[in-house]
Image: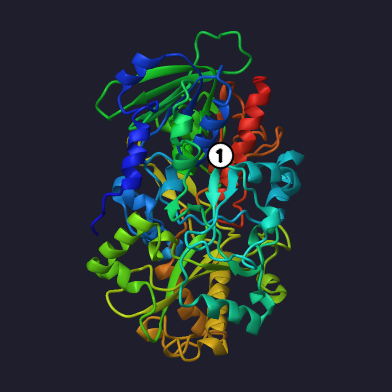
Amino acid sequence: MTWLNSSLFLTSLLLYCSAAIYDRVDQLRNATTKFDFVIIGGGTAGSVLANRLTESASVSVLVLEAGGSNIGAIPTQIPFFCTLSHPQYDWNYTTTPQEGLSGREIPYTRGFILGGSSSVNGMFYTRGSADDYDRLANVTGDSGWSWENVQIYFRRNEKWTPPADHHNTTGQYDPSIHSLNGINSVSLAGFPQSINKNIIRTAIELGGIFQYNLDMNSGKPLGLGWLQTTIDGGNRSSAATSYLGPEFTRRPNLHVLINTRVTRILQDRSSPGDRLPRLNVVEFAQNSDGPRYQVTASREVLLSAGAIGTPQILLNSGIGNSSYLSSLGISPIVNLPSVGQNFTDHPRLVNNWPVSGNRTFDDIYRDSNLSTFLQNVWSQNGKGPLVDTFVSHLLFARLNASTLGQFGEDPAAGVRSAHYELGFSNGDISVAPTGHFIGITTRVVSPLSRGTVLLKSTNPFAAPLISPNLLSNEFDLLAMREALKTSVKFLAAPVWKEYVLGNPDTVFLQPEMIAAKLGLKGPQDEQLDAYIRNNTGTSAHAVGTAAMTGQNSSFGVVNSDFKVKGVEGLRVVDASIFPFIPSAHTQAPVYVIAERAADMIKSFWRD
């Protein structure tokens, strides 16, 4: 794939020349060495904190980001190419062998760039259900986390933006629940796909679980509706382009050091009288063989390295299971056995059915001339199919009562919450060499499987042991199976009869499974389960490894105010704090928790 230069990016680059973004430590030292807050990670949550805390000119903030700048990273800015691999902007993690995935090791994408995973994700904007937030309020004992009480933070984050083609969006969303005054752009699809009308017709024809939902971000996501995305006029709207945009990074009290790895958080030995250990000294380096530097936060260290990086840094700092840390030769500071535990993700399975005709986006991936032409259209006019992500519509659904009755508990947060999701795309994002397809990506959004993030070595530059433990719980396998059966029901609607080639219930299975008929009992389901285990991967929606719980809970890593239990001067603010995974793509929920964290921190320090 050849990437074109864009006048849009050249303009942005010139703006950033005057911004306080440094790529060398000596540049930072020439600026200032005293900071009120040190934020570890310039990703989704860290960018929000940096922006909000520096609204007060009297507060100084340093952001330490492991990756590079997002400026000039054109492949990440074109929405449609979010499905392609961009190793230069990725941590390039790989999981341990996953028993539930037939023993496979799978790639685990994490954004290695300013903006973090908001700079490389699929840009889905889904808030989750009201139940998700009410459950968080109940678990933490903090009513501020309820659905009603977090609405202010959704509005602070969101800036509703017209789609790239400026089409009439009446009936595609509910304007009353969206904000025009936030920071991060949210929009609808800006290029019409050939399958869009038939998707909506299917919702009308089938009804039931396929019933049309005007806006899935109302707190009641069940049903089928238009996907909303973090896209601004055909360009990705990430935490870096919004919260760390040029108008904010030019603030004299905000400093961002990129290409910098945090190795440990250290105890402040100058405060011996504190009741608890005070961890407000950050050790960092710019390469594994280079010198280690230290910077002290006069107020707090805010750890926002994500659900993989945060537990790795905590463990290397002596915060975790004391016995485990001692076995690695790390001196424990505080015994928090929950660090690195409770790792939760949404299993994801890409499924494709061959279709008649060629009005799909498949050729964009494999025809370099077409790709170059469309990049020119995107760059010069902000138009064409590259202005959108790969999905136009979503379905959120629950298992029926009889199926759910096979299990002793409902893992969903409540009756308004989904168990699985279907995402509809006008092509194969797996990039098949030939043919044209309709794709339905299935996900389990209320999984019961739990995994771990542990240390492979005490070398902070070494990747940790990442085990999401996908499909280890029987419920998740059953939910994925039901999601596939729902996909088949969807494509069996009359509107698809002349479009989808072959029988929808068999065509996507491996040749030896062609005889299997979905919905039947016995070996057929076993064959389908084999297909699931052999092909499922990750949504890269990592959460839970530094879970938020009530102050007196025996489980968890942080209290409801994000403060790490048993220490002072340290908070964790990122996706790792969710004790349960939201039944949504995790980007919007992370923005919300970061917005509330910023409020809490400012209130605590009376700024």
- Does the rendering let one see residue 367? yes
Q: At numbered mark 1, what does the secondary structure look like: helix, strand or loop?
A: loop
Q: Quadrant of residue 593?
A: top right
Q: Position of residue 335 (x, y in %)?
A: 56, 29
Q: Please state the total of marks drawn on the protein image.
A: 1
Q: Position of residue 46 (x, y in %)?
A: 50, 35
Left or right relative to 318: residue 374: left
Vertical comparison of 546 with 532: above or below: above
Q: In which quadrant will I find the N terminus?
A: bottom left
Q: Quadrant of residue 521?
A: bottom right
The answer to whether any part of residue 292 appears in the image is no
Residue 85 drawn above or below residue 425:
above
Residue at horizontal 61 percent and vertical 29 percent from the top: 563
How crowded is the residue under tag 1: few (<14 C-alpha within 10 Å), some, or many (20+)? many
Q: Nearer the viewer, residue 556 or 31?
A: 31
Q: Quadrant of the C terminus?
A: top right
| Residue 198 horizontal side relative to residue 437, left or right | right
Label 1 belongs to which residue?
Answer: 546
Q: Which quadrant would residue 515 be assigned to in this image?
A: bottom left
Q: Check the image and report above or below for 605 versus 351.
A: above
Residue drawn at point x = 66 percent, y = 29 percent: 600
Residue 290 point in image, percent of width and height: 26, 24
Q: Using the image as rendered, state which of residue 186 and residue 338 is in the foreground.
A: 186
Above or below: residue 436 compared with residue 565: below
Q: Which residue is found at the position 70% from the left and 76% from the top?
A: 402
Identify the residue shown where x is 44% and y is 65%: 390
Three-letter code, disc 1: Ala
